[in-house]
Amino acid sequence: MKAIHTFLFSGLTALTLLGCNQSHANNNDKQPKNSVHMKFEKVALPYATDALEPVISKQTVELHYGKHHQAYVDNLNRLIVGTKFENADLETIVKESDGAIFNNAGQTLNHNIYFTSFKKNGGGEPKGKLAKAINEQFGSFDKFQEEFTAAGVSLFGSGWVWLAKNNSGKLSILKESNAGNPLTSGLTPILGFDVWEHSYYLDYQNRRADHLKKLWEIIDWEVVSARY
């Protein structure tokens, strides 16, 4: 994930596996021969911390990515030690865990997707298959934007608003509280907007709607379309 093209993959599994570093534990003699311990890391930013200004300030990126995201990753790595998830991939943990492990795994995956959905001078509209699916499901890109933004504004408390697809490619908008991710509903996340206050409060204070509307100006539709 050292460059933005790293994220032009098919399938979410590639995203999650790139978000972690596989390494053998020091006490290899105590593990099964083929056991691999996966130490998770937050995804590398494909842009400079000031690249998204003025939509998202450098200070917000540094705090959100550098502090909040890092804390979820650190907590996850600590919590899975000695559990059945110690050698699991991130997707599996999100699908099968609960409690503190789920919260930190979900937030690790959510933020990996979130931070790689943007680019400097992004915006515009998607093309190709994703554009066609949006038009078929929502009537137009403008209507999709309105519905997606409204979902994020109306979500009570902290959480995420997601664009997700099912196995047949049909799109839907989901509101998830806290660390929720469409994977737990059998869907694949395509695009997620973070509506936790830490994602926007320094720049927009309590104006969540203003923040969500501005995010459309920095979306990297090439990456989002690749997820579809």
Image: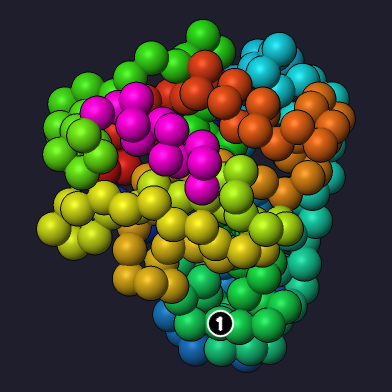
Which quarter of the figure has residue 49? top right
Q: Main secondary structure of the magenta part?
A: helix
Left or right, residue 39 beside residue 131: right
Where residue 182 sits: x, y (%)? 42, 63
Is residue 111 in the magenta section?
no
Q: Residue at x 63, y 88 (%)?
A: 83
Q: Which residues are magenta?
A: 140-151
Question: Is the residue marked by circle 1 packed among few (<14), some (14-19), or many (20+) residues within 10 Å?
Answer: some
Amino acid on which the number 1 mark rests in the picture? Ser
Where residue 42 sits: x, y (%)? 65, 48
Question: What residue sits right under mark 1 in the picture?
Answer: 97
Q: Which of 121/193 is in front? A: 193
> Quadrant of the image for the C terminus?
top left
Left or right, residue 147 beside residue 74: left
Please say if 46 is above or below 171: above
Please say if 97 is above or below 146: below
